[in-house]
Image (cartoon, rainbow, N blue to C red):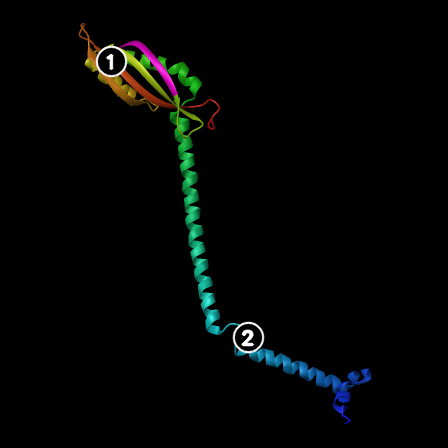
Amino acid sequence: MPRDFSFVRGLVRPRAAWKEPKTLIRLALGVLLLANLVAVAFAFHWIGDSSETVGRQLTDARHQILLQQARLADTKKMDSKVVQARLEGDNFIATYMTTRRSTYSTILNELHQTAAAAGMSSREASITLDPVEGSDTLSEMTISANFEGTYGNVLRLVNALDKSPRFLIIESTTTSPQASGLLSVNIKLNLFIRDDNGGIS
């Protein structure tokens, strides 16, 4: 049975037919129609998110921005506090903690002078040095010094040591009476010193 393929021949046009004005106009109208269909699909949200979804996403994005801005402000405040604490710590160490070399050479001499000013006689003294746990630049010096004097002299000495610019810490004071009527006093002192090559000069 013969078949009619005339409709196929109608679709398959010679190359010259595609350049005819009617064909070009039809092609342009077809492209415009397709573009309009795509625009309608977006307008009625056939493609993509609905306006409510977009609105929620925008609200969530603004909320996240506000949270991030608040966190950034808190981080800046914390950073400034850390910097301030570091500066104050460095100033404290530089002001009240001397180097090991200068402390070793002067601390006992200063103790003898302070005791003499308080009216006490200096006796033997010993020094020990221990590292401070968690620090690479600080050490704790412990001084055990013995003196002899009256009760009033002891009060003056303790008061002078308490006001020392070296940040001395009086750990303990032990007194015992002597046959001469004077008191024998042992004072244990702690102070912190920094290494000669520490981070603060």
Q: Residue at x 29, y 10 (%)?
A: 122
Is residue 47 shown above or below 144? below
Between 107 and 195, the one nearer to me in the picture: 195
Badge 2 element = loop
- Is residue 183 rendered to the left or right of residue 5? left
- What secondary structure is found at the residue carrying circle 1? strand
Q: In which quarter of the image is the N terminus?
A: bottom right
Q: Which disc, if any, is residue 67?
A: none
Nearer-the-camera pick, 51 or 7: 7
Label 2 packing within 10 angstroms: few (<14), some (14-19), many (20+): few
Q: Are marks 2 and 1 in contact (CB under 8 Å)?
A: no
- In reply to whether residue 119 is colored magenta, the answer given is yes
Q: Which of pointers 2 and 1 indicates the residue nearer the eye?
A: 2
Residue lying furthest bottom in this view?
Answer: 1
Residue at x 70% of width, y 82% of height: 28
Check disc 1 and give the amino acid type.
Val
| 39 relative position to 114: left or right | right
Name the residue carrying label 1. 185
Q: Residue furthest front?
A: 1
Mark 2–mark 1 distance (CA, rounded to whole Å): 93 Å
Report which quarter residue 183 is drawn in: top left
* Residue designated by label 2: 47
72 to 194, vertically: above or below: below
Span shown in magenta:
118-129
